[in-house]
Every structure is written in structure tokens, then in C-alpha cells.
Image: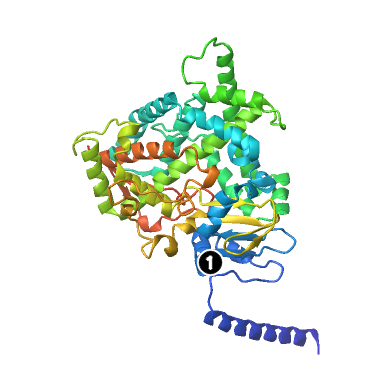
Amino acid sequence: MDFLECSLLFLLIFCFTYSIWFIIYRRTKTSAPTNWPILRELPAVIGNIHRGHAYMTEVLLEYGGTYQFKGPIFTNMDMFFTCDPANIHYIFSKNFSNYPKGPEFRKIFDILGNGIFNVDHELWELHRKTTMSIMSHAKFQILLERTLWDIIEKRLKPILDAFAKQGKTLDLQDVLQRFTFDSITILLLDHDPRSLSIDLPYLPYEKAFGDALDALLHRHITPKCLWKLQQWLRIGKEKKLMQACEAFDQFIYPCIAQKQEELIHKSTIKDEEFAFLNAYIKMYNQWNDGDLGTLQTFLRDTFINLMFAGRDTTSAALTWFFVLLAKNSLVEKKIREEIQQQLHVKEDENLKFFTKEESRKLIYLHGALCETLRLFPSVSLEHKIPLDHDILPSGHRVSPKTRMILPFYVMGRMETLWGKDCLEFKPERWISERGGIKHEPSFKFPAFNAGPRTCLGKEMAFVQMKIVAATIIHNYNIEVVEPENVYPTTSIIMQVKNGLMVKVVKKV
């Protein structure tokens, strides 16, 4: 038998085998990835990367909330996915000490350095204590309100007015990201980058956040040896991440240096403007259990962590909020009525100012924001690796080599948690029979994380979201262009793919 005959025979056998496999597969169709030789289940991930959250939801719901993913051989990419609320509660609360961020997390998120989201144990506790003491201070609450309303009146409303007058489409996601970036930078560093200006300037350090998040997700689905090689060669996603780091450093180090210089030349601190800087310098000087690098490096790490949290999570939640309102006009109408009734403002009257305490009266708006975060949690997933061998409540065994992915996005789509109407946008599910806010346990609603690592900025985020949302809803009509084509990015932070294009119509 010559080479040609052998080749034809092989081809016939292959086609016959594939046909049989295909027929069987079609009869027993499943969402689960096919386990191929060598590459195992990675091709399915690559093939569905454009719809990563939806695909993850399909697989986990089919397999009861837990799935063990098999990565290519010799790559250490096997992952354990779980959205089982009993497992979530156990990992984040009951056995919290066995599930730190860990060295693997620190390698992937090396851009965060020694900031609060990247450290464990005593250093994390000190970070948390320091940050909490500032954010709970009365002067910080006053500064927060003043900063938000200043940016709204001087920048946000003029921009919306201009686009409404011109009848042009606007990327609302971009505007909200600029808003939150300016506000968090002012609060942390007393520096105003003015990214939210009428000409919407391109600022490399503001746009670097998106590039960094994209690259960090890429590290989760790429063999470590490969992304390390890309990093060494300065190519691909790693090149973008390095450029993002450089942009951050070029922006933040001068801000820190300027604040330190002003601090040196001030004999007394009368205001809250240096609260964060002072507190973290004090924290750095107190720490004597490990190398934090130079003071400037530590401050850079600390502020980058808080800026990631302050810019991306709040803006993402607000963006999805307006997406969902565009599809639920009755909800928008109820929110408008609540604003008029609770804030004592007429329909044709401009909504200019209300306080944090007054925002607590907006119960239905609060419910709508919670419902948004249930369906589109700003942080779509968490990454954990156990310290010791353990058995989860679901009965699954995990080891110190188990990479665990906890997808919060999927949890909002579980009928077992939220009922058969889990895909519907219903703010009413967050309102109690007495008309107050209905609180759900964090292991069921982990939009602000759960357990000891629950987000410190939760209250601040709700204040910011309510002020921005109420201002826009009362004063403008937001019409989403092609709402049927709005999809989430496959990213750690759940943003709208290609931005949220809207038309603005001024009401007041």
C-alpha cells in the first residue's frame, strides 16, 4: 500500500469516526467544553471568549453551580469554578483564613503591588483599618458630597446639555468613567485631572485602566509561561499592560510628590485634604514586618488600588443601570415619581442638590441599583487558592494547587437563588413589606464581595450612584442607541462592550 492509499484510508477512518462522534454529540448536546487531547478544554474557552460570562453561566447552571475545568497538560491551568452559595459562604466567611489572595493572585495582579486588594493577613488588616478610619470620618463625608456636586454642576450637566442641544450621540460609559475617575482622584490625592471636560480629552493614564483590566483577565486563560514570555518580549496584552503601568506611574508619582512637598511646608493640617496621604504615611512607618519598598512605591500601590475600585466599579454599575432603564420604562417612571416626592422637587424644576441623608429616602432607586448589581455585578468574578487541603460544603475536595474561580455574574441568574423570574429586572424584590430596603446575605448577593473582605466603599458607592442617577433621570431623558446590541465585555470589571452610545434629551 503506497503513501497515497494510506493517506486516503486514514482520511476515511477519520471522517467516519468524526461523523459517529458528531451524531452522538448532537443527541447528547451539552454546554460543557469538549475534552480534547493535550489542549483538553481550552479550545472551548477560546471559542467562547467573546461571550465569556454567558458561556460560564450556561456551563455552571447545567452542572449545578460547580465545574472543574481542565486546562492544557503541563500548564497548571486547571480551574475549579463554583457559584454554589454554600461554597461562597464557606470560602469567604466560615473558613476565610484558608482562602487568602495568595502568591498566585499576587503574580497575576502584580500591577496592584502592596495595595489592599493584593495583600493578606496583618498587612491587609492594617490597610482595611486605615482606610475605614478615613472613610467613616465626618469630614470625608462632607468632602464627598461637595466633590460630587461640584463635578455634576460644573462638568457633567454642561456636557449633557451640550450633547442634548447638538443632538449628537454620546458614549455614556466613557462620561461616567471620567466622572468617577475625577471624583476619586480629588478625594484621594486632592488633585483634579479634569478628564471630564467639554472636549472629552484623551488622557493616557485615565484610559490605561481599561487596558490593564483586559490584560489581567488574559492572564487567567493563558498559560503562565506564555504570558511571561509576552511580558519579556513586550508584545501582545502584556505590552499594553506595561504601557498602562507606565501611564499610571507618570501620573501618580508626581501627584504624590507634590502632596508630600506641600505637607512638608505646612506646619499644621487644618483640613481633610491630606487625610489619606497622612494616614498611609503613618501606616508605612508603623509596618515592620516585611519589605513594602520605598514610601513612594507603597503610596503608589495604595492609591492605584483605591482608584481602580473608585473609578471602574461605580461607573460600570451606573452604565448597566441606564441600559436596564432603557428596557424598563415603567421602572424609570417610578424612580422619577419617587425623586419628586421624596426630594420635594417639581417635574419642571431643576434638581440641583440633595444630601447623603436625603438620598436614603430613595428606596425604589436603591432597589433598582441593587437589581442592576445582581444582574451585572461590577466585579464579575473572584480568584482564590486554598492554603491547605479542604472539603467544600458541595462535597468537592480542593488542594493548595486548586485555582478557584468564583463567578458572581452567574449567581444573579440562578433560579434556585432568585426564583423563576431571575432574569427579570424587578427593583421590587429589594423592598420589604414595610417599604424599607430588603437586605440579602452577601453569599447570595456578593456584588460588594462577602465576609471580612466586604467592600469598604459600599456606602460611598451608593451615595455616588444615587446622586448621579437621580440627577440624570430627573433632568434628562437617556435614549440608548440600539439597546439590543449592548453586551458585556469578557473582563474582570463588567463593562459594556464598545461603550454605551446614547442620545440625551433635556427635560428641565
Q: Where's the C terminus, which quadrant?
A: top left
Task: Residue 474 in the image: state x and y as whole percent.
Answer: 26, 40
Q: Work out whether residue 43 can be spotted.
A: yes
The residue under label 1 is which amino acid type? Val
Question: Along the horizontal axis of the image, is 162 left or right of 444?
Answer: left
Residue sticking out furthest to the front: 94
Q: Between 341 and 227, which is closer to the camera in this rendering? A: 341
Colouring used for the render = rainbow
Q: Residue at x 58, y 52 (%)?
A: 91
| Above or below, 385 relative to 354 | below
Q: Left or right? Give the position of 110 relative to 407.
A: right
Q: Position of residue 216 (x, y in %)?
A: 60, 47
Residue 300 placement: quadrant: top right
Above or below residue 265? Residue 250 is below
Quadrant in the picture for the N terminus: bottom right
Which residue is at a point 24% across and 48% down the rendered structure image?
333
